[in-house]
Image: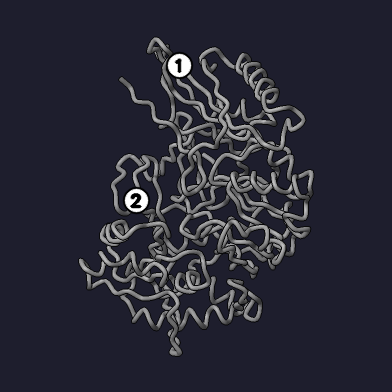
Amino acid sequence: MLTPSPERFRKYTDDAEFDRIHDFDTVTDMWAHCVSEYGPHPAVIDNGAAFTYAQLEDDAAGFRTLLGAPEAGSRIALFAANSYDFIKAYLAVVTSGCTAVIFPAHLDETAVFGCCMMFGVSQLVYQPDFADRLALLKARRPDIALLPADAVSDEKTPAAPCTGRTPCVIVFTGGTTGRSKGALLSNEAVMQGTVNGCYGTPKVFDQRYLLILPLSHVFGLIRNLMTSLYTGSTLFICRNNKDMFRDIAAFRPTIMVMVPALAEMALTLSKRFGRNMLGDDLKVIICGAAPVSPFLIAEYDKIGVKLLAGYGLTESANLVSGNPESLQKPESVGLPYPNQELRFVNGELWLKGRNMMEGYVGAEEPDAYEDGWFKTGDLAHLDEDGYLYITGRIKEIIVLQSGENVSPAEVETSFNALPFVQDSQVFEDENEFGAQILALEVVLRPTVLTELSPEERKEYAMQELERVNKTLPSFQQVSRIVIRDTDFQRSPAMKIVRYKHDKK
């Protein structure tokens, strides 16, 4: 069992800045500190308008009035795209002692109604553009109050007191089974995740963040928004990812939070059009939510950007570990963060700690816990330096007819080490005789092997993939390799959607 210490991260940050990192019990406490400390500093830039910390609190205080003094613990849904109004409403809800239930912006009217029922919502804050998706809710549950996110009030209501155990936010997750539900995070869990975002980067405070990830995803909410506010930084909201490079040129961010697929796209365009596509001020990319290729880490380092990989779960308020030594240990997800315990049971990572959720809402997961430990479903191990490695998911294990267990992610790591492989997927399939086999599909990286013709490129790639395949243990070797001409299907979080094998 491992209980990490924050001091392991001190050497990666200036001492004076590191000593400014301290815990708050609640978002309300943190936010009061931020307003006092950073009041005139710009907190959010959206649609060309800059809003200071003081102004954001003033607007949040007005929105608290519009919420109408809800009972402590009330669940209030937020149904809006990334925007200043979303952030204002979110802060108003959680500093009122209520629980913000964050709905993904893509939900249709049936899903909106169903989620309100599933989560016991008493009010719904909505983006006016989404009003047409509220018809079913209005018809069937007129008792649920509806409040437009852009509403304002001149009357200000102060924040309500709460404790670290007070529920703070419900974020959608598939959990360990993939069934949609919500993870209920307390104030102290959200604050631990927020503080964890400060560890391992050279400069922590007074940074410039670009917001690309949806705030309905825990990675965007905690690491992008909350850590930005905690550190007195400025958050520029990119309303459309197609405008990302235009926004980078205008805002010149110092830190960006990305999933690997976005980091891959940014690297490709930077190689094609020049380093200034990312802006000369960009120093750090925080990358997670899916496996990060060592190739990305090395290539970003060549252009002066630290790409720092990490690992987290919605159930752990996002952040479990982060890798300040990405170049030295590129296949690791880093050092575990403090105030949590890690345990390994038959190769599976189990967690306890201040950052962990209170439980699931909307679906039962009876096997998620054992003796108070949350079972992540991830296969993992630590090396001799205490760095964490994720080698696959238990539910994705392929059991061969020989009795051998194969982790697709572990096998994919070998193929992904080839510089021309952008993404890969190992899966269970059948040959022409109906016998069980392992198959591999890969997507080639467009910036590598460009000197070859398309045919030569595929021929060379296939030879190298076959070469790597022969180095694997016999039970891990694939029997079929396909080079794709298109990307894999991806989830809203940009993770590859894995194939499901129909067993006969």
Query: To which quarter of the image does residue 500 belong?
Result: top left
Q: Residue at x 61, y 26 (%)?
A: 415
For marks 1 and 2 on the same chain, the one whose residue lies earlier in the sequence: 2
Place of residue 201 in the rendered image (x, y in percent of width and height, measured from the top left): 69, 54
Asked whether residue 49 is in view, the answer is yes
Q: Is residue 201 left or right of residue 341?
A: right
**Label 1 Cα neighbours within 10 Å, binned few <14 / some 14-19 / many ≥20:** some
Q: How far apart are the two marked residues, 1 and 2, measured between alpha carbons?
A: 34 Å
Q: Residue at x 56, y 30 (%)?
A: 484
Place of residue 14 in the rendered image (x, y in percent of width and height, measured from the top left): 75, 59
Q: Secondary structure at mark 2?
A: strand
| Furthest residue in direction bottom, as rendered | 154
The amino acid on which the numbered mark 2 sits, given as a three-letter code, is Lys
Along the viewing direction, whichever of 31 and 116 lies nearer the viewer: 116
Relative to 21, residue 417 above or below? above
Place of residue 466 in the rendered image (x, y in percent of width and height, measured from the top left): 62, 17
Residue that label 1 marks: 437
